[in-house]
Image (cartoon, rainbow, N blue to C red):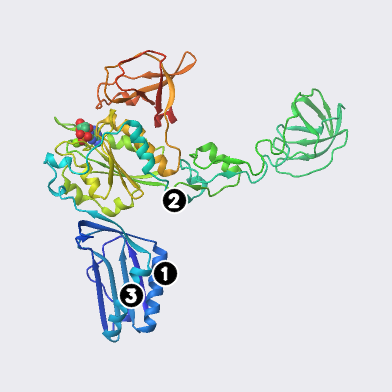
Amino acid sequence: MEIEIQLTNSPIAGKIFPPAGGVAGAWLEFRGVVRGEENGQKIAALEYEAYPEMAEREIRRLLEALAAQHPCLAARVIHRVGIISVGETAIYVGVAGRHRGEALALLAKFMDGLKRDVPIWKRHALPVQSSAPHFAGQPELAKAGTPDIMRSLDEAMAKITLHCHPLPPVRVPLEESIGRVLRETVCAPEDLPANDRSTRDGYAILAADAAEKFQVVDTIHAADWKPRQLKFGEAVRVATGSALPCDGVRVVMQENVGRNGDQIRINKLEAGLNLRKRGEDVKAGQPLVSSGVRLDAGKLALLATAGCPQPLVSPRLRVLHFTTGDEIILLDQTPKPGQIRDSNSILIRGLLQNFSCDLEQRHLPENFEAAWAQLDLNRIAAADLVLISGGASVGDKDFTRPLLERFGFEIIFSQVNLRPGKPLIFGINGSRVAFGLPGNALSHFVCFHFAVATALAKLAGEIAPRFLLGKLAAKLDDKPCPRETLWPARLEFSGGEVKLQPLAWASSGDVTCFAAANALIRVPVNCAELEAGAELEFLPTTSMLGA
Ligand code: AMP
Ligand code: MG
C-alpha cells in the first residue's frame, strides 16, 4: 500500500487528491474538525502537540499492519499540530481501495489505533472569553478574569522564579554559543598546560648548572616535542611556549645571553625559572566552566582550550513582542497632539541584546477583535516568551490581560506593589511565559530588569538576577510612598569606592533618566529620606555589561 504522512503547522487544504497509486476504485476521505466544545466548555481553539518522528513512524506502522488485514491501494494522513481554531481540520485521512468495504474498515481501525498508539495529543484547549469579543471600549470587561492580588516585589520575583523552568538544552558549535547558558559542567580533559613549557624565548639549561658557558645542543620550537635529558654544560634553544626537554631545568632569557656559534655565555641569571609547570593552570578532570554560567568571550576561549567544540547550552529563545496603543507612531513621523513615538520596541530590542534570542516585533491595533484577528496563533504557540507593551492596566482600552488569557495563558499576577511598574501582568502557558508590561518608558525599563530578566534567566537555566548591596553617593530625597521603589541610579567610582548615584526622575513616563541608569536602587516602602552613605539593595541593569 502506498503511504503518505504529513505533520504540519499549516491549515489543511480543502481539496486533497489521492496519491498516484490510489486513483482506481474507491477514495474514502475523513476529516476531524475542531468542535466548539471540549469537556463541556466552550472553546476557541485546540492545541495539538506531537513527537513528530515517532508519530510518523507509528502512523506508518499502524497503516502497514492494517493493510495486511484490509488490502488497500493507498493512504494519505495529514495531521495538524499547533493551535487549530474551531471549525478547522485537525486531521485528514484519505484511503484508496479497490472496494469501499476494505477502505472503510481500514479507516475505522486506523482512527482507533491513532488515538491509542500515536504520540500526538491535545495539549491544551483555548477557552472562549465571553467578555473578549466586545471588549474594547467597555471598561467593565477590563476587570474580567480572576481577582487581582497585588504582589510585593519579592513575591512577584518568587512567582516568576517558581513558574519558569529551564528549556531543554541543545548542542551547538562553540562559535554560536556566546551569550547562551552552559548546561553541563565542562572539565579539563588533560592537564593544562599539558607539559612544562618555557615562558620566554631563550635557552633551557639544568637548573642546578652553575656554569657560565654552554654548548647549544638542539633547538625546540613551540610546535616541537623533543624530550632529551640535558647534561651539565648543555643548553637547548627554546621559544615561548616550547615544551621543555626534561625535568629540573630553567630558561635563561635570550636578552641575557651572548651567543657565538653553538656557544652561549650567560651574562645575567634571572631570579625566576621562566617556565610553566604541567597542570599549573588546572589538572585533568577539574571543572573548568560550571553548568548554569552564561558564556562570554573568555569562557568560550577556555572551552576551546579544553577541546569542547559543541557545548550543551540553552536554546535560543523565541521572543514575540507586541506594542499596542493607537497613539503610537513610527520614529520618522512627527507626533500630532496625543501621539507618541514608539520607544518601547527599540528598548526591548536593546535589552534583549544580552540574551540569546530571536525577536519578532509587531504593532497591534487597539481593539481586541482586530488585534486577535491579526495574530498568527501558531507563531504564538511556538514562542517561548510573549511580551505585550501597554494596555496592561484597567483602562477602557487595555486588553492585554484578556488577550493573554485567550492565548491560553494563566495569569499568575497582574499587579505589583512597586513604583514604577505597578500594572505588570505575568502569565504562564505550559513552558511558555508572557508579560504584559506597562507602556510607560521607565516602567518598561524597570519591569524588564526585575521581571522579564528573571524569566529569561530561568528559561535559559541560569541563576536569576539578584539584588546586591551598595552605598548611596548622595542623599536620596523622596516623599513617603506606600509602594517599594526601584529607583534609577548610576553606579560610579567616587572617593575610591563604588557608589550609587540616584538619578532624578519625575514619573513613570520619564524618558531621560534611564539613558544614564546602570542600576536600580531598591527603596523601601514609606521611606522619605536616605542619607548619603546609606547601604541599600540594588539591581544592576543590563547596561552594566557595557558600562
Ligand atoms: P499604557 O500602559 O497603554 O496605559 O500606556 C502608558 C503610557 O505609555 C502611555 O502614555 C502610552 O502612550 C505610553 N506608551 C505605550 N506604548 C508605548 C511605546 N511603544 N513607546 C512609547 N510609549 C508608549
Ligand atoms: Mg495604552
Q: Is residue 333 visible?
A: no
Q: Residue at x 34, y 34 (%)?
A: 155
- Residue tagged by mark 3? 110
| Residue picked out by circle 2 | 168
For this view, does 10 lie left or right of residue 171?
left
Q: Earlier in the sequence, mark 3 or mark 2?
A: 3
Mark pair 3, 1: CA separation: 14 Å
Asked if residue 325 is positioned above or below residue 518 in the image, the reply reads: below
Disc 3 versus disc 2: distance between alpha carbons? 33 Å
Residue positioned 33% across, 31% down in the render = 153
- The residue that disc 1 covers is 57
Identify which amino acid the numbered label 1 is placed on: Arg
For the residues labelled 2 and 1, the Cα–Cα distance comes to: 23 Å
User: What amino acid is labelled 2 in the image?
Assistant: Pro
Of the pair 50 and 325, the residue shown nearer to us: 50
Q: Is the CB atom of the residue marked by disc 2 within 8 angstroms of ligand 1's nearest atom? A: no
Within the displayed image, which quadrant is ligand 1 positioned in? top left
Q: How would you rate the neighbour count of disc 1 (Cα within 10 Å): few for under 14, some for 14-19, many for 20 or more?
A: few
- Residue 540 lies, in percent from the top left, at 41, 28
Q: Nearer the viewer, residue 328 or 294?
A: 294
**Quarter-of-image position of residue 246:** top right
**SS of the residue at dot 2?**
loop
Please, is residue 11 above or below residue 299 in the view? below
